Amino acid sequence: MSDATKPLFWRDPRLPHVELRKVEDGRKVCYAPHSHMHWSLGAITAGESTFRYRSDRYHVTAGTLVMMNPEWMHACSAIDDRPWAYLMLYVDTGWLTQLRYQAGLLAEPRWQDIATAVLGEPRWYEGYCQMAACLLDPSRDLLAKQTGVVEYLGALMHELAGQPAQPLPEAPVMLRELTAYLDENAAQDISLDELCERSGYSPGHLIRAFKQHFGFTPHAYLVNRRIQLGQRELKGGTPIAEAALNAGFSDQPHFQRTFKRLVAATPKQYRQPSHEQ
């Protein structure tokens, strides 16, 4: 990959609730459908791309913001190899919930999905770019970065308030218990037979019902969770081979291929972010 196509990851342990990704040439960046535990806010900084969000598809261009709720399936890809670039901010869900609650935007300190998927107003795009530039600038001090994040996200949450997302029908208790089991045992070898035995569903019924409620088959859900485990390991400084095993992958090459497919970056690129010394 050329320098332009390599993603840059910014993290600072003093701001553990945010992480920023920058891609200057996204033509080779194509995500498989995936989800995150955190809330994500992206800015298309050049060109155009497609944005798949649950069952909806959007054509997004420079100057557009895109938003993704925790656990909502999404994917982005280039259009006919046309250039595009973007910034993506990943925000800890618990931290953002408290920000919204303390601002009087939530009746209780519990996460509420946000309905808006795409925002095209220039002032919000420009504000996002200013906040991102502050985070990426090693000459800016900690207070400036903290203030920039809180001011921008606080204002944006006020802008989006009153737009609760239409939730999917709640999954049956048995399916929710299966997701909890997969979460707790993501690094273990789990079979479809085991999941059917736990749920009482037939294989076909289980796969259809699971995908209907969560957007993934049980296998895709498990792989997604394993990659999230791998990201956590890598952020903690764990060597790639060890992170692969800890996340439930049988070998490092399999981990690297899957990581690249879902994160659109190599484990090495993700493990070595730009940060202040």
Image: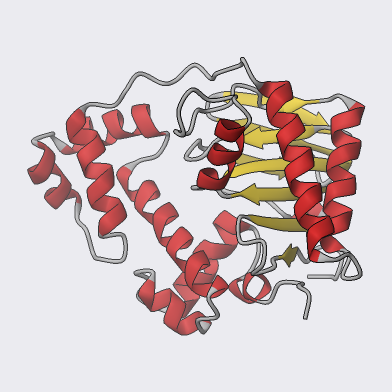
Q: Where is residue 251 in the image (x, y as percent from the top left)?
A: 40, 78
Q: Is residue 240 above or below residue 174?
A: below
The residue at 72%/54% (across/down) is 29
Q: Where is residue 94 in the image (x, y as percent from the top left)?
A: 50, 45
The residue at 59%/63% (across/down) is 260
User: Would residue 175 appear left or right of 268 to someone viewing this image?
Assistant: left
Task: Look at the image and name its color scheme.
Answer: secondary structure
Of residues 194 and 146, the one drawn nearer to the viewer in this rendering: 146
Q: In this view, does 82 lie above or below 25?
A: above
- Total numbered circles: 0
The residue at 25%/66% (across/down) is 188
Q: Where is residue 117 in the image (x, y as percent from the top left)?
A: 66, 27
Q: Position of residue 100 (x, y in %)?
A: 60, 33
* Viewer can see residue 62: no
Q: In this view, does 258 lie above or below 128?
A: below
Q: Please state, as top left, top right, bottom left or bottom right, where the N terminus lies in the image.
A: bottom right
* Viewer can see residue 207: yes
Q: Please state, as top left, top right, bottom left or bottom right, where the C terminus lies in the image.
A: bottom right
Q: Quadrant of residue 53?
A: top right
Of residues 92 and 199, the one drawn nearer to the viewer in this rendering: 92
Q: Is residue 6 above or below residue 191?
A: below
